Amino acid sequence: MPRGTPYTHLAMDAEIIATGTELLLGETLDTNSSYLATQLPFVGLQVKQVTLVDDNIENLAEVLERARNRSTFTFTIGGLGPTKDDITREAIARVLGESIFTDEGLLEELMAIFHRRDASMPPHNLKQAGLIPSAVGIPNRQGTAPGWWAERDGHIIVALPGPPRELHEMWEREIMPRIQKMGIGQVVLTRTLKTIGLSEALVDEMASPFLGGENPYTGIYAKPDGIHLRMIARAASQEEALDLVRPIEEKLREIFTTSIWGVDSESPQRVVGEMLTKRGMTLATMESCTGGLLASTITDVSGSSAYFKGGIVSYTNDLKEASGVDAALIQRHGAVSQQVAEAMAEAVRIRLKADFGIGITGVAGPDGLEDVQPGTVYIGVAGDGRRQSDLHRFPQNNRSLIKHRSVVSALLALRQLLESAA
């Protein structure tokens, strides 16, 4: 199909092919396909299938051929590196019956990357400058592997790099704008309201008048950071899709009010970070059963050093006491208690000279502790002259889930305290 041909008549279907033997062995989690599947509806494409395939050119070529025969777009992920296992270019060339040649423009860009690193380009990196006649190179500002946009016979193959940082950058800066300019089909818009403190059954009951439906569709989903309400609308433009979603969102906000803590891609750690930054305040943490996961999650946000003083992993009672928690309090109420959670939050706030403190103490399992059942977690927050704590009972048989839900609940508890202090 000649470039520049209108695409409004094309089907809106797409497939994703993620390559890598490590994906099939479970050594690496395929987060890229999930990311891409959430992004494609924004440009009017509907994902029909996601396939994982190993680093075998015969297998990859077979999967690519099937995708070409039933979908308009195929997005490949990974296999664009310089090693022998990186065979995505070769597989695309085989399926299209074309030969790979060295593109001088790509080679020049590749050599410039190594020059900026004050290094010479290894010979095996030369394959990353390869192209076929039906493809154009896509700049990669985060790595050495350019992507491909291969267009032929009414089908488009978009080859994206495997490292998530490279893929996200390339999608946002290069691929998404290119597809948007093609003006294909409808826009699919999603809007997610995130609730906390409510069970899935209760959210289902409260939102029941608005669940289901054709356009927009509304559903509920249980996630580690609470129960989500997701609205999905299809329309000719983003503005029209917003007009469909807006009335439902307004009704749901009236129903759930303060139980809604965030929307769309917002995370508890980012929401809390923005609130602390806006107020010019700081945070410190003391955690036991989460083993440092709270501090790690907070520092996942770029710029968190502006408001996060640090954390103490007080996994033993001795360290809790050494960090400022009264030994008599632990003896009287037990290490896993409301009183100790609040004391941990206040002690770390004072010790690290922060405006707010969080304390987490509990039993991550699988065994109980001091007659306390696994999944029992107390979360304390302190600051602005106040202390408060909550008891949480998470599923007993999943240590990792208990730790992650404790972290999310702790951050959202701080959010509530910050809101009330405003």
Image (tube, rainbow, N blue to C red):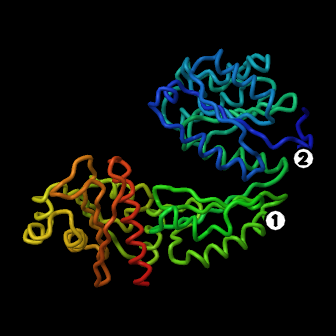
Q: Residue tagged by mark 2? A: 8
Q: Residue tagged by mark 1? A: 240
Q: Are marks 1 and 2 in contact (CB under 8 Å)?
A: no
Residue at horizontal 28 percent and vertical 52 percent from the top? 364
Q: Position of residue 408 (x, y in %)?
A: 41, 61
Kind of residue at badge 2: Thr
Kind of residue at badge 1: Glu
Residue at horizontal 22 percent and vertical 48 percent from the top? 367
Residue at horizontal 26 percent and vertical 46 percent from the top? 366
Helix, strand, or loop for circle 2? loop
Locate residue 404 relative to residue 13 in the image: left or right.
left
Between residue 344 and residue 403, name the one nearer to us: 403
Q: Quadrant of the C terminus?
A: bottom left
Q: Position of residue 190 (x, y in %)?
A: 68, 58
- Mark in front: 1 vs 2: 1
Badge 2: residue crowd in 10 Å (few <14, some 14–19, many ≥20): few
398 shown above or below 248? above
Residue at horizontal 56 percent and vertical 37 percent from the top? 143
Locate residue 362 relative to residue 129 in the image: left or right.
left
Q: Position of residue 204 (x, y in %)?
A: 57, 64
Q: Quadrant of the N terminus?
A: top right
N-terminal of the pair, mark 1 or mark 2, is: 2
Residue 344 in view here: yes
